[in-house]
Image (spheres, grey):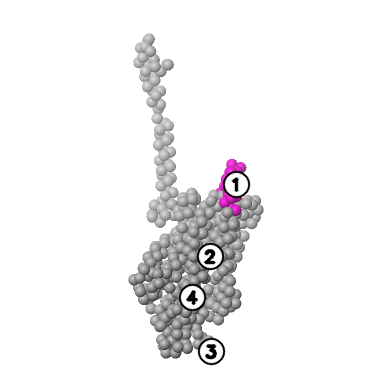
């Protein structure tokens, strides 16, 4: 706190959890010169305060939270399945390695959104104490969720570029995207993702509420607060929040550009499909599978864009939109499995194998039995005498001389 003005700036993360008076400043009743202030105001779109637990805004948040929990649990299962299936595929390619890393970040996103949306609603509804556990739960959960979203978006961008280059330059791509070079590419992308997210972990801290006895109404019930560290000034003021802008805006135009180029080139390549070898056809099929993943990514980014733009313009952190952002991230992270299953025949077959093993049903053995049974039936049928020839011989023996024979017509 700056002792000369006796004003404490609280970070946006925390300010979204409290109701501030007009002016985004709340002062002590005992010492009016001691105040806290925020750059944004946390509020419900419908205008209620946090204590109106059964208001429209609260109920809407509860409804979206329930859906988020269901989608998040489904996403955790789906992404575990994706990783297991790609790991045991007989025809393993570098492309599969990229998809597994993408699923790893989607798995993190689904787990984090469960934690973050739950603690949001728990604080709004006053289900839990505002102690050190709740604050770390909220702070680390939110940071991990943003990390998962960043990783998912940047890996999707990297896969999109890789798919375009492989389709556009098939001969050179064999040299560019070997297993070793693809691994190095993944490490480089992970490094970039880490650099963008480090400020979110080191610029904030959880500390005891030293204003507990000062009768500041908006934070009176909080035993601990989320406050900014000294590094917050460097990354968010001096560097103008550059990491957030790069994280949020850089991947989208690159994804649009390379997906349009990939789609155009795929249409052109499909017209010459007869001239392609098996490997080229497989690469185009892989692109055909992945394009819907990017479409879903764009659609689910509509809500975060609306939230971000409204926050910048109005300086209001709308709590319903915040929960909706988590739901959109969960939908994006949970959807890839269904896309791979519907559009990829090899992935679909491998999925059936994995699920059959989990259910104690050996699908491979059953198929071999069915195949062997079919072969036996076909063999036995082929060994049966020709019934038509037998009837013809009988007619020939029994037919009297001079009788007209239909089989001779």
Q: Which residue is mark 3?
A: 4
Asked if the residue at tag 3 contacts the one at tag 2, i.e. Cβ–Cβ closer than 8 Å, the answer is no
User: In the rendering, which numbered label is found on residue 251?
Assistant: none
Q: Residues within 10 Å of mark 2 (few under 14, many from 20)?
A: many
Question: Against 325, is 289 above or below?
Answer: above
Q: Which of the two discs, 2 and 4, labels the residue nearer the N terminus?
A: 4
Measured Cα–Cα span from mark 1 to mark 4: 50 Å
Distance from the alpha carbon under mark 1 to that under mark 2: 31 Å
- Please say if 228 is above or below 148: below
Q: Is residue 22 visible?
A: yes
Front: mark 3 or 1: 3
Asked whether 279 falls inside the magenta stretch, the response is: yes
Structural distance between the alpha carbons of marks 3 and 4:
23 Å
Identify the secondary structure beneath mark 4: loop
Residue indicated by mark 4: 40
Report the magenta residues as a range. 261-283
Separation of residues labelled 2 and 4 (CA atoms) = 27 Å
Residue designated by label 1:
268
Please provide percent x and percent y for residue 344.
49, 50
Mark 3 or mark 4, earlier in chain: 3
- Residues 314 and 335: in front is 314
Of the residues under marks 2 and 3, which one precedes in the sequence? 3
Label 3 element class: loop
Residue with the mark numbered 2:
151
Q: Nearer the viewer, residue 49 or 211?
A: 49
């Amino acid at each position: 706190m700056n002792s000369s003005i006796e004003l404490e700036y609280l970070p946006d993360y925390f300010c979204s959890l409290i109701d501030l008076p007009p002016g985004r400043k709340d002062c002590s009743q005992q010492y009016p010169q001691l105040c806290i202030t925020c750059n944004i105001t946390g509020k419900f779109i419908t205008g209620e305060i946090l204590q109106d637990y059964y208001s429209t805004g609260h109920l809407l948040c509860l409804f979206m939270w329930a859906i988020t929990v269901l989608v998040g649990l489904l996403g955790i299962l789906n992404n575990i399945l994706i990783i297991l299936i790609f790991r045991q595929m007989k025809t393993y390619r570098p492309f599969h390695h990229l998809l597994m890393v993408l699923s790893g970040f989607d798995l993190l996103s689904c787990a984090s959104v469960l934690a973050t949306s739950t603690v949001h609603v728990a604080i709004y509804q006053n289900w839990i104490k505002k102690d050190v556990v709740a604050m770390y739960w909220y702070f680390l959960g939110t940071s991990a969720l943003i990390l998962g979203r960043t990783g998912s978006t940047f890996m999707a961008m990297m896969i999109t570029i890789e798919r375009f280059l492989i389709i556009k330059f098939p001969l050179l791509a064999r040299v560019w995207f070997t297993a070793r070079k693809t691994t190095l590419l993944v490490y480089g992308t992970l490094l970039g993702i880490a650099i963008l997210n480090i400020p979110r972990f080191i610029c904030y801290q959880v500390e005891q509420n030293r204003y507990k006895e000062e009768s500041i109404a908006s934070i009176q019930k909080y035993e601990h607060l989320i406050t900014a560290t000294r590094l917050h000034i460097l990354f968010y003021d001096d560097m103008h929040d550059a990491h957030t802008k790069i994280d949020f805006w850089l991947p989208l135009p690159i994804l649009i550009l390379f997906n349009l180029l990939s789609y155009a080139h795929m249409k052109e390549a499909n017209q010459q499909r007869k001239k392609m070898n098996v490997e080229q056809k497989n690469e185009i099929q892989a692109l055909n599978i992945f394009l819907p993943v990017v479409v879903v990514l764009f659609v689910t980014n509509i809500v975060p864009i609306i939230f971000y733009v409204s926050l910048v313009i109005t300086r209001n952190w709308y709590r319903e939109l915040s929960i909706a952002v988590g739901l959109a991230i969960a939908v994006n992270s949970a959807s890839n499995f269904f896309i791979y299953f519907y559009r990829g025949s090899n992935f679909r077959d491998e999925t059936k194998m994995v699920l059959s093993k989990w259910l104690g049903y050996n699908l491979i053995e059953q198929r071999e039995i069915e195949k062997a049974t079919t072969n036996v039936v076909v063999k036995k049928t082929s060994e049966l005498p020709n019934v038509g020839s037998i009837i013809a011989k009988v007619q020939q023996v029994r037919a009297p001389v001079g009788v007209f024979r239909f089989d001779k017509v």
